[in-house]
Amino acid sequence: MVTGRIVSVDSARATLAFANRINGLIDCSDREVTMDMASAVSKTGVCSVSIAEVRDLSDVIIVLGDDCLIDRFPNLASCLAKRDRSPVVVLLGQQTSKSMAIWKQCFPETWAIECNVERIPESLHSFFSLPTALSANDLSIPLNTNHLFQQLSQANYISLVWAPSSLGSYSLDSRGRSAWMERLLEHQVEWNEKRRIGSLALSGQDAVFQQVCLWTTGFPGRVSFSNDSIDFEPAVYSVSRWIAENKNRADALLIEFDESANGVNDWLDSQLEAFQGRRILASPFNRYGTTDNSTLIHLPSQIAGYDRPADLLRADQTVLARVLGTQSTRSAAARSLSQWVEELSQ
């Protein structure tokens, strides 16, 4: 099994070619969020819009979630602001005064409507039914909202802004997260019968691998290679399932490629606690220290876009940027993932 956190185009291409060469399985969907989103999109047909579209066309921007969104994307509000127009912004969920201050600095007319984040799709459905649904139990409606409802009813273009990766901060398991996304996108299809509503779903770093996998295989990830044939079974070829099925096999081999700046991967490490197979970890940080472990090989790698130049995707997946990187003090033994892939292929 090949897995990891791959954030650059060249590394994604190299790891896919490597998995093909060894007739292996590959799943690089960090915390499985991107696969849940891909499933929701395939079932509903709803695609995300770009940052530029939200910035240039929106009359109302509805931001979904909690403070986790602005923590993950601190420049989001300023990126959506445009000098010659100022749409209404509605913070729907459980966003505190911290987020309110950031959004209000860029958008003077910013409202906060509190609701349970796990019920945002239903709350949003009620919100679009206002003012007939003023008594909705799952919405905490602020006072003096007549102007807000008027703006909402007259809006020609409404944008929903959210991040699938932030759903992990809510009390949702994988099944609940997938259902949340599907409900939101299904409602969006219904709403678009009467007005234009776009959805800006901001992606995490693992979206790069998903996009490259789509370009090269036609599938968004979780594929099995066998004699140059490709099989796509997202429920079968997940790294979580593979670890559970092979944790007691001494001959099982997990190859993890990591070029992110995050030295912690609690989600994967928690699943590997009882894993008895062999592991190769190519990453900038050895998460397991210097303890003697004959079943683990650590290969020091570089951080894409920091230690070396890399092609990265913007969070809306519409812009491919060349990030030049800076000089690093990392060990001279650290190599790019593409270089380690070449070494392992020999």
Image: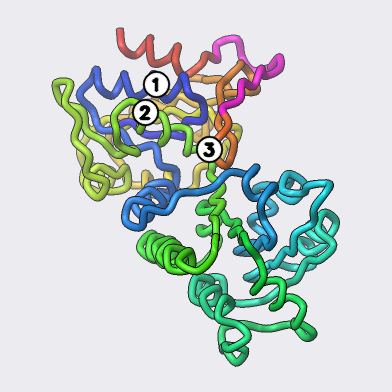
Residue at the image point whose x is 64% and y is 50% from the top: 54
- Taking 60 as reference, is 260 above or below it? above
- Is disc 1 in contact with disc 2, using a CB cutoff of under 8 Å? no
Which residue does the numbered mark 2 point to in the structure image?
215
Q: Nearer the viewer, mark 3 or mark 1?
A: 3
Q: Nearer the viewer, mark 1 or mark 2?
A: 2
Quadrant in which the N terminus appears = top left
Left or right, residue 167 beside residue 134: left
Q: Check the image and report above or below for 219 versus 304.
A: below
Q: Secondary structure at mark 3?
A: loop
Residue 56 numbered tag: none
Prevailing secondary structure class for the magenta stretch in the rendered image: loop
Q: Is residue 332 magenta?
A: yes
Q: Residue at x 51, y 16 (%)?
A: 336
Q: Is residue 219 left or right of residue 299?
A: left
The three-letter code of the residue at mark 3 reads Gln
Write the start and end of the magenta stretch as one range.
Answer: 320-334
Task: From the top left corner, tell me how far across and down residue 38 is, in percent.
Answer: 38, 48
- Quadrant of the image for the C terminus? top left
Q: Please state which amino acid type lies under the numbered disc 1.
A: Arg
Disc 3 from disc 2: Cα separation:
13 Å
Q: Neighbour class for label 1 at 10 Å: few (<14), some, many (≥20)? A: some
Marks 3 and 1: CB-CB under 8 Å? no
Q: Residue at x 60, y 64 (%)?
A: 65
Task: Identify residue for label 3.
Answer: 317
Residue 13: numbered disc? 1
Would you call the spot at circle 2 few (<14 residues within 10 Å), some (14-19), or many (20 or more)? few
Q: Is residue 305 magenta?
A: no
